Image (cartoon, grey):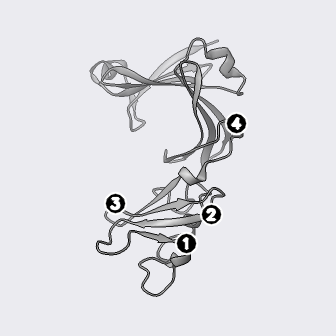
Amino acid sequence: MGISTTYIDFLGQPLSKKEVEISPDYFEITLKDEVVFKTIRFEKKIPTEIIIDISSSSDILTFISDYPNATFRLPKVTNMTYEFAEIFTYRNSQLENRARQIVSSNNNVETIDCDFDTGRPLYETFEKWHYDTNGEIEYIFHYHEDGSFSYVELMQYPGVAKNINDWEIGKPGAKFNWNMVDAFYRHAEPLISNTDPSN
């Protein structure tokens, strides 16, 4: 079994061993037979997160004794557009968080927490952010348990009600209506927009 190590910065750019020596922040990636097995995040030269890629959830039992404070990542779907994975975060060998994660082809990442037992996405904890042309947050969208739209926060309208509920949209005087944004924001799914990966 061939084991190798590579390094990248936080923007995903490769680093040489000499560059790593002078860089405080980077990822150390361990590969087994050219497949990612372990990723360690270093901040100011201190390891702050260990991510172990696994092929089934039963692998957690195999590695938990060696990595009691790690995040285990189980890829589910990988194609040219995105990668979908389940995430299990452990502290002191106890499950602390369970989530679903999607990484788009341009490394845009969205993560949604899930119920520990059922794996159901907790849409009520999820937000989608919409940015204006200057890169400032314009709207923050919130959702019900079933993923349907709940309300939107208006981030750039001083002097008006900050939150617009689903039943208020389109009414006279409302500062928001659906023709102002893409349909992507009307529901929690999909987590990543197919039309504008920056959103």
Please give the name of the residue rendered at 72% of the width and 40% of the height, measured from the top-left corner: 118
Query: Is tag 3's residue or tag 4's residue first in the polypeptide sequence?
Result: 4
Please give the name of the residue rendered at 58% of the width and 65% of the height, measured from the top-left corner: 149
Which three-letter amino acid code belongs to the residue tagged 2? Ser
Q: Position of residue 183 (x, y in %)?
A: 57, 69
Dot 1, how many residues are within 10 Å of its Cα: few (below 14), some (14-19), or many (20+)? Answer: some
Visible residue check, residue 36: no
Tags 4 and 1 touching, CB below 8 Å: no
Quick one: 134 or 148, which is closer to the camera? 148
Label 4 belongs to which residue? 117
Q: CA distance from mark 1 to mark 2?
A: 10 Å
Query: Is tag 2's residue or tag 3's residue first in the polypeptide sequence?
Result: 3
Q: Nearer the viewer, mark 3 or mark 4?
A: 4
Label 1 belongs to which residue? 166
Visible residue check, residue 149: yes
Q: Position of residue 90 (x, y in %)?
A: 56, 25
Secondary structure under badge 4?
loop
